[in-house]
Image: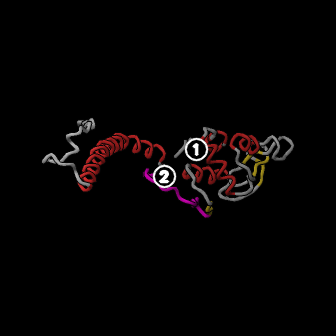
C-alpha cells in the first residue's frame, strides 16, 4: 500500500484571480475553500483507514484470547447423573462418575450392593456399600474416610451411597484404589 502525503499549495495573488485575470467572485472563493478542505481531509481519512486495517489482526487476537472457551470449544458432554448397578442392586448418583465400571466391581465385591456396617476381613468395622474402615476408636475419627476427606475436600458419610461413590471415584482417580482388599483380589485398575 502506498501512502501519499500531499503538501498544501501556497496561494499566490494570481490564484485569487479568475482564469481571465479578474477577481474571483464569492461563489468561486467558496468552491476553492471546499476544494482545499477536501484535499486536507482526504489524507486524514486515508490514514485512519490504514490504521484501522493495521489494527484488525490485533483486535482479532484480543477477541480470541478473551473469548470464553466453552462457547467455541467442542467439549465432551458429561452426564448430570450416573446409574451404577450390579446383580440385584442399583444406585443413581447426581454427578458424573469417571470410574463407573471399576466402582461397580468394587461395590459387588465389598458389599454386594448392601449399605451395611460390619467387620471387614481384617476385623475392623467398615461402613457403607464400599466398606470404608472406621478409626481406632470405632468412629470416623482417624478413619480411611476421614483421611480421604481431608485429602480430597469431599465431605459426607461412607454410609451415604452417593457420598461413598463420589469419594471412591476421587480415590481411584488419585491412585488410591489398592486401599480396598477387593481391588487387589480382583486385580482391578482404573477404568477396568
Residue on which disc 1 sits: 186
User: What residue do we see at 58% from left, 51% from top?
Assistant: 105
Is residue 78 within the magenta segment?
yes
- Secondary structure mainly formed by the magenta segment: loop
Looking at the image, the residue that sits furthest to the left is 20
Q: Where does residue 20 sit, x and y in percent of width and height?
A: 12, 48
Left or right: residue 118 versus residue 18 is right
The one of 116 and 82 positioned closer to us in this rendering: 82
Q: Which mark is residue 28?
A: none
Quarter of the figure with residue 96: bottom right
Quarter of the figure with residue 174: top right
Kindly report the distance in space between the C-alpha atoms of the residues bearing marks 2 and 1.
Answer: 39 Å
The one of 2 and 120 positioned closer to us in this rendering: 2
The one of 97 and 1 positioned closer to us in this rendering: 1
Left or right: residue 113 versus residue 117 is left
Q: Where does residue 49 sit, x and y in percent of width and height?
A: 32, 45
Q: Which residues are magenta?
A: 71-88
Amino acid at each position: 500500500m502506498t501512502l501519499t502525503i500531499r503538501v498544501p499549495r501556497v496561494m499566490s495573488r494570481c490564484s485569487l484571480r479568475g482564469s481571465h485575470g479578474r477577481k474571483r467572485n464569492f461563489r468561486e472563493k467558496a468552491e476553492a475553500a471546499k476544494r482545499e478542505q477536501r484535499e486536507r481531509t482526504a489524507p486524514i481519512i486515508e490514514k485512519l483507514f490504514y490504521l484501522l486495517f493495521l489494527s484488525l489482526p490485533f483486535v482479532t487476537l484480543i477477541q480470541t484470547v478473551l473469548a470464553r472457551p466453552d462457547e467455541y470449544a467442542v467439549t465432551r458432554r458429561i452426564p448430570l447423573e450416573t446409574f451404577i448397578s450390579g446383580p440385584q442392586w442399583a444406585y443413581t448418583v447426581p454427578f458424573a462418575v469417571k470410574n463407573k465400571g471399576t466402582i461397580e466391581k468394587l461395590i459387588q465385591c465389598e458389599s454386594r450392593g448392601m449399605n451395611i456396617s460390619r467387620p471387614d476381613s481384617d476385623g475392623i468395622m467398615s461402613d457403607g456399600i464400599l466398606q470404608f474402615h472406621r478409626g481406632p476408636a470405632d468412629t470416623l475419627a482417624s478413619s480411611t474416610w476421614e483421611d480421604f476427606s481431608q485429602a480430597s475436600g469431599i465431605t459426607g458419610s461412607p454410609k451415604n451411597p452417593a457420598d461413598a461413590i463420589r469419594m471412591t471415584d476421587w480415590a481411584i482417580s488419585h491412585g488410591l484404589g489398592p486401599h480396598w482388599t477387593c481391588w487387589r483380589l480382583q486385580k482391578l485398575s482404573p477404568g477396568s
